[in-house]
Amino acid sequence: MIAVLIVIAVVAALLLVAGGTLLVSRRAKRQIPPVTGSGIVGVARPEPELEAGPPEPELEAGPPEPELEAGPPRIASRIGKARGLLAGYLRAVRARSSLDAAVWDGLEEALLRADVGMATTDALLADLRERARKGELAGPEEVLVALKDDMVSALGSVGDTGLSMADSGAVTVWLFVGVNGVGKTTSIGKIAQAQSDAGRSVLLAAGDTFRAAASEQLAAWAERAGVEVVRGAEGGDPSAVVYDAVQRAAARGNDLVLADTAGRLHTKVNLIEELKKIRRVADREPGRVTEVLLVLDATTGQNGLTQARQFTDAVGVTGVVLTKLDGTAKGGIVVAIQRELGLPVKLVGIGEGQRDLVRFDAAEFVEALLG
Ligand SMILES: Nc1nc2c(ncn2[C@@H]2O[C@H](COP(=O)(O)OP(=O)(O)O)[C@@H](O)[C@H]2O)c(=O)[nH]1
Ligand SMILES: [Mg+2]
């Protein structure tokens, strides 16, 4: 009887220990913080040590994270639609035994379908045809390799993808502009997270005062990222909100203000006037606007270019944040933006999650698209 009791006690103890170990290892797994911002948001200054940043928010706090991904998501894993569209054309091109008309037609159609745009497609193909005519490119495979190289250099020729900071002593302001629904507020939320992970002290300015929900949405992102937000009254003066945010940042010693704006009035002159004013006010000491980021929605393809032109000249855009690249076959729009607007795409949005915004890398992107 005693022997039986002893056996039962030993088994129970073993079960307890095993259960405990399992729990601990589960918890440990859940608490492993995702690898922070290395692929996100480039900066001109060296990155501070990760340890300097605020503590990682609990995973539960953010929007759903894609599973099975350690580090920041790679572009290739998210632009399946664009890859899929091109893959069919490229297979057919590769299958040709010589550089016949079908090769050129196939390439042209592929690029146009991917929304690279007529002008850019023509320019890319004219160069390749000329090189083929001179005998520099022998077959379809060589043409494809040359096309990739040309795309990478076209993408790299319009400037740096880094995001710059003001000299110390000033408060850096990054201003986000673009029409309604393109992803300004969401991108600010993601950047706030990445920048505070990188050790910066970030403050958000809810410059979209058009409706209360806009600043509430920004406040929700601020909370997730563990940063503060300065809000104004609904319908209030957005410049005043941005001004207050810069003052507050200076007083509190924040390095970086991310300023949201409204995008609703884009057909009227006064949105542009409003943005110019916000920019002027944000640039007053101690504020310094070092980036004006035009947010464009990749799913609108070529239409986005028309929008972009309305903003670029007026507010001195320094770069593009291209969102929703995960939801479109029109990935070629990246090439059109850089070539036709002469603006670098600095960041790309590849999902709705907190870490789904990555620094744009031309070689990685072209390989993901055509590889
Ligand atoms: N799939 C996907 N959705 C995005 C991305 N960026 C933003 N969105 C969604 O686009 C919608 C509009 O975004 P919002 O930030 O409110 O746009 P805003 O009006 O320019 O501030 C929201 O539902 C976002 O979740 C992205 O990169 N990928
Ligand atoms: Mg918004």
Image (cartoon, rainbow, N blue to C red):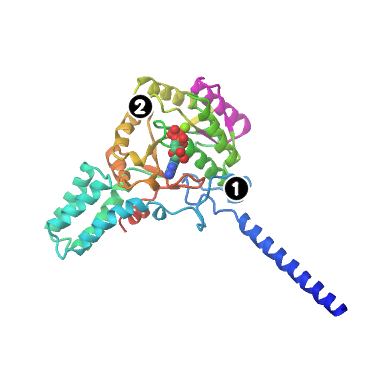
Q: In this view, does 168 lie to the left or right of 307?
A: right
- Mark 2 residue CB less than 8 A from any atom of ligand 1: no
Q: Which amino acid does label 2 sit on?
A: Ala
* Above-or-below relation of 348 to 140: above
**Residue 163 percent coordinates (x, y):** 45, 41
Extreme right residue here? 2
| Residue 171 occupies quadrant | top right
Label 2 Cα neighbours within 10 Å, binned few <14 / some 14-19 / many ≥20: few
Q: Mark 2 or 1, which is nearer the eye? A: 1
**Residue 215 percent coordinates (x, y):** 53, 29
Which residue lies at the image location 50% right of the left edge and 20% below the top edge? 235
- Nearer to the camera, 39 or 218: 218
The quarter of the rendering in which ligand 1 is drawn is top left
Q: Which amino acid does label 1 sit on?
A: Glu
From the image, tell me which residue sits under label 2. 314
* Above-or-below relation of 290 to 328: above
For the image, the number of numbered tags is: 2
Q: In this view, does 291 lie to the left or right of 57?
A: left
Label 1 Cα neighbours within 10 Å, binned few <14 / some 14-19 / many ≥20: few
Residue 240 is inside the magenta segment: yes
Residue 186 is inside the magenta segment: no
Which residue lies at the image location 18% right of the left edge and 46% below the top edge? 122
Q: Can residue 162 be seen in this view?
A: no
- Nearer to the camera, 254 or 224: 224
The residues colored magenta run: 229-258
* Mark number, residue 60: 1
Q: Is residue 92 left or right of residue 32?
A: left
